Image (cartoon, grey):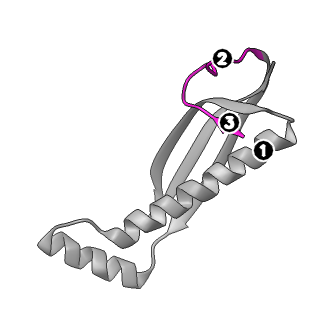
């Protein structure tokens, strides 16, 4: 599946927009990671366990978006955007969305 942040695919013609597709993942933190993150707040630096957790959540959300586009028979997803938010204490949401399209 071709995924681009642009509204068009270079060298290709979009013949049909199939609709918006999305993928979501809500990831919760665990006590061990929270303790280590608290220590990082004291001494500073990257909280690598959270960076890894968010990267994994982004990957899962992207895979879910691709599955949805495949179910529509899409060739590509254009206008892809990512977002994140805190949904409750200790949990974050990653969302990815775009427009599924057929290419000529």
Please tell me whether residue 15 belongs to the stretch shown in magenta: no
Residue 14 visible in this rendered orientation of the protein: yes
Report the residue marked by disc 1.
Answer: 68
SS at mark 3 in the image: strand
Q: CA distance from mark 2 to mark 1?
A: 24 Å
**Residue for badge 3:** 2
Q: Quadrant of the N terminus?
A: top right
- Magenta span covers which residues? 1-14
Q: Residue 20 occupies which quadrant of the picture?
A: top right
37 to 8, vertically: above or below: below
Name the one closer to the observer, 28 or 73: 73
Q: How many numbered markers are drawn?
A: 3
**Which quarter of the rendered picture does the C terminus lie within?**
top right
Q: In the image as oriented, which residue stretches furthest toward the left?
A: 43
- In terms of depth relative to the viewer, which is nearer, 24 or 13? 13
Label 3–label 2 contact, CB within 8 A: no
Q: Residue at x 85, y 36 (%)?
A: 72
User: Is 93 in front, or is 15?
Assistant: 15
Q: Are marks 3 and 1 in contact (CB under 8 Å)?
A: no
Can you tell which of label 3 and label 1 is closer to the viewer?
Answer: 3
The first of marks 3 and 2 along the sequence is 3
Q: How many residues crowd around disc 3 within 10 Å: few (fewer than 14), some, or many (20 or more)?
A: few
Question: Which residue is identified by label 2?
Answer: 11
């Amino acid at each position: 599946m071709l995924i681009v942040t642009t509204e068009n695919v270079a060298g290709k013609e979009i013949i049909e927009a199939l609709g918006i597709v999305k993928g979501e993942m809500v990831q919760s933190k665990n006590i061990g990671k929270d303790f280590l993150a608290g220590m990082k707040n004291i001494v500073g630096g990257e909280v690598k366990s959270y960076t890894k957790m968010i990267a994994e959540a982004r990957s899962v959300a992207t895979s879910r978006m691709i599955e949805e586009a495949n179910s529509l028979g899409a060739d590509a997803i254009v206008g892809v955007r990512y977002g994140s938010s805190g949904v409750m204490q200790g949990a974050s949401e990653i969302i990815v969305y775009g427009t599924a399209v057929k290419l000529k």
